[in-house]
Amino acid sequence: MRLSRAQLPEFSWRTAVIALLLASLLVPVIVGSGFFFPYVVPRNLFFRVVVELGVTTLVLALCFGRNTLDLHDEPIFWSLVTFLAAATLSAFFSPASTHSFFGDFERMGGVWAWLHLVLFFLLLRALRDENWGWILNVALAVSLLVSVRAIGQHSDVVSAAAVSDGVIGPSESTFGNSGLLAAYLLMNIAIAGYLATSSVRYRLLYLSAAGVNLLALVYAENRSAVVGLLLGAIVGGVTFATLSVQSRKKWIAPLVAATLAVLIIAISVGIRAFPTSAATQHVPTVLQRLASTNPAGSDESRTMQWRAAIEGFRDRPLLGYGLENHNLVWSAHFDPGIYKIDTDIYDRTHNQFLEMLATTGLVGAIAFLAIWFAIGMTLVRAFRAGRLSASAVAVLAGLQVAYATYLFFWFVDLNSTMLWILIAALIASRGTVGSVVLETTGRDTEEPAFKPVLALASILVLAAVLYGEAYTPLRANRALARIDSPGESVGQTLSEFDLLSRTSARQTTHTPMVMAQFMGSLRSRLSYLGADPGRRRILDRSTIMRAVSWWRRRNFTNRRPTNSRRSMPSTRQSTSVPVA
């Protein structure tokens, strides 16, 4: 059947933006081979490139059309901009300014990451109301792929444990870290719930999708997400009961949530009282872990980080140490008691709010809390305007409580934080009518004001950013991965040292450690390599010799840099510590 022109969607700048936004939702399933931190670097670089292309498209649309940008009534956007400004100011005065701006390959955070999240919000606000169905449904579809993978992993682990009598570990799916997976699933449960409130026809389908995500969340075995989901359900239920003044069944939701809370508390008490009973063995592992929580015992490593963050705030109360610099806080306030419990190296507080207080000071912490306040204020406005139902407000408000609870024990991560920003943009789109991009009609006889200089500048900036902050880090990361997991000859691996010594990539925290570790692995062969004239020329290069000298000084003095790890992480693993 042939389609007429009227049936085909007209291609426009907004179509391009929608396509790029849909592509960005694939971030959680991107895992590249041959990368240093493959669960972090490729998806972050991909997300940034997509956002940069989208913003350039938007700028060009503003330069060559009758379009204008109206941001005067966008409290969430301006709260994000305010936080970005506070984080930038903190980074300027940070003792590790570059790391605060650009982070490292392990996290890919910092001011640069938050800038892209703010621009991501702006692109989402360029959508019309009818475009949001595509965004939310694709996000949910991707989450189902992730959840099915997590459920499949759990089944495989259970089967293997039954044969070898092993321990059933948490599912990680495409994340390499069960804790970060849990936050992502938490977001998608809320997206499914919101879609269920707005579509009666497909309500059962969306609730089924929420159930699949919930099952995967249970298999992720993350206590923080489960507690957050429970508190969010209670708050959402109370919110629904409060706003639904005409519904006779309005108290069913809070009663169900409260009953579930009592049941989980009762199970936890029973597990603590009878830890070896037969019934305990059949309880989901996440509830067993929840029942065994001990802030003064196995979980004390977390409270140590919290105390260090508070001391770090006292050191620099106004602007803090800069984003991504909890490692400096921990180095300044190291507690030797950590050796009795866990690893001694921490680059995260595992409490996002305390981390903001220590790394961005009062200015950044207040600005961060202002984002949540703006979201709440916009939710109220959207409900009063009749653009959100009571059930939708309950779901979205409950999510904010759930995510805040999760962040009280964890930290922001691209996979979940980008969805938090997406939902914030959804709320903003319901708080005001229409897109922030105002388009004049074709009847307007006024000639559009072209801005070719701005358009050219935006293209040049895009080219510079793509080269300097996408291609350059990509090359450096892959070179670092080849040194960390050498599979070629020594000469070919050593050639990567030259690339890393000349690169302008800023995520170089791990570079000297990986170089030194590789040179250390050659210790028994240095004399042999030096005897061969061809190989000696390779070793004689100044960059190589500096690495050797650095490694020898470290080895002979028996000193280890405060920010190194006991053993370098594999390039095929995530190094986040799933302690919750």
Image: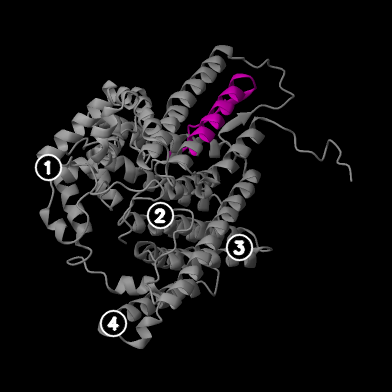
Res. 206 mark:
3
Task: Classify 179 as above or below 15.
Answer: below
Identity of the amino acid at label 4?
Pro
> Residue 379 in the image: x percent, y percent?
47, 51
Res. 501 mark:
none
Q: Report which quarter residue 246 is drawn in.
A: bottom right
Q: CA distance from mark 4 to mark 2?
A: 28 Å
Q: Report which quarter residue 491 is drawn in.
A: top left
Q: Which residue corresponds to mark 2?
A: 180
SS at mark 3 in the image: helix
Q: Residue at coordinates 53% horizontally, 60% vertically from top-left?
A: 149
Magenta run includes residue 29: no
Identity of the amino acid at label 3?
Tyr
Boundaries of the magenta span? 47-75
Q: Earlier in the sequence, mark 3 or mark 1?
A: 3
Q: CA distance from mark 3 to mark 4?
A: 37 Å
Identity of the amino acid at label 1?
Asn
SS at mark 4 in the image: loop
Magenta run includes residue 53: yes
For label 4, count other residues whose C-alpha is less than 10 Å away and answer few (under 14), some (14-19) or many (20+): some
Q: Which residue corresponds to mark 4?
A: 275
- Do residues under tags 3 and 4 come within 8 Å of each other at their CB atoms? no
Q: Earlier in the sequence, mark 3 or mark 4?
A: 3
- Do residues under tags 4 and 2 come within 8 Å of each other at their CB atoms? no
